Image: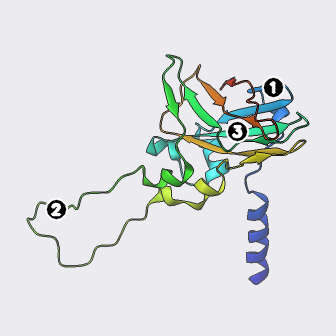
Amino acid sequence: MLFLSIAAWGADKDKRFRAEAADTYATKQAHAGLTIAVVPYHTAEKMKSAFGKLNLSEYGVLPVLMVMKNDTGKTLRLADMAVDYVTPERFKVEATPSSEVQYLQGPKRPDFGGRPFPNPLPQRKKTNKLASYEIEGFAFNAKMLPAGESAHGFVYFQTNYQRGSMIYVRGIVEAQSGKELFYFEIPTE
């Protein structure tokens, strides 16, 4: 019995989320040696591959995988990078920090079942599914990107996926010179 549980644990470990190289994605843009690829995770299949049973679209959250490959020959500073989701109507949605996603559900009002006073028996607390470790654990949080290196992670937006939308990335700076790179407008399909 112990061997089966160890084998199941090992098989489950192989299923963990992995990103491919930035060049392999269809939705990418390259400029001056930096390649950025984006993939919106709006279908149940994609969502399950990264977040398991948690379907973020049920909470109005769109996770977008962002993969970067730095072939500029210079270290890039990403600390001031801004990522926006732009709809086909040109409505801009700023990225929600991964640490704030768990608070998007908001507090629940107590339900006394039509009675003026609460039930004296203790109620079972509901868990916040948005407090899942995958949300912060898989978030894009690189602050620097050395030459020849890659970084990946999810960026979260409080919106639903729309065909014809794009991801707008700006604020990437060469670490040594302080020169800002050109902005990126990457279509999501």
Q: CA distance from mark 2 to mark 3?
A: 45 Å
As drawn, the label of residue 66 is: 3
Q: Where's residue 175, x and y in %?
A: 79, 41
Residue designated by label 2: 113
The N terminus - image quarter: bottom right
Badge 3, how many Cα within 10 Å: few under 14, some, many 20+? many
Please name whichever residue, 133 or 118, is drawn nearer the observer in this view of the structure: 133
Question: Image check: 124 left or right of 162?
Answer: left
| x 23%, y 62%: residue | 110
- Which amino acid type corresponds to the residue marked 1 in the rendered image? Ala
Q: Nearer the viewer, mark 2 or mark 1?
A: 1
Residue 30's label in the rendered image is: 1
Q: Nearer the viewer, mark 2 or mark 3?
A: 3
Spot occupied by residue 93 in the image (x, y as percentages of width and height): 50, 31
Instruction: Give the percent coordinates (x, y) of residue 84.
Output: 57, 31
Name the residue nearer the viewer: 172 or 161: 172
Depicted 42 relative to depicted 141: above or below: above
Residue, x 49% and y 16% (percent of image)?
Answer: 89
Q: Which numbered disc flags the more N-terminal residue, 1 or 3?
A: 1
**Dot 2 alpha-carbon crowd within 10 angstroms: few under 14, some 14 to 19, many 20 or more:** few
Q: Residue at x 77, y 76 (%)?
A: 6
Q: Which of marks 1 and 2 precedes in the sequence?
A: 1
Q: Residue furthest front?
A: 177
On screen, 188 above or below 173?
Answer: above
As helix, strand or loop, the secondary structure at mark 1 comes to: strand
Residue at 22% x, 79% y is: 121
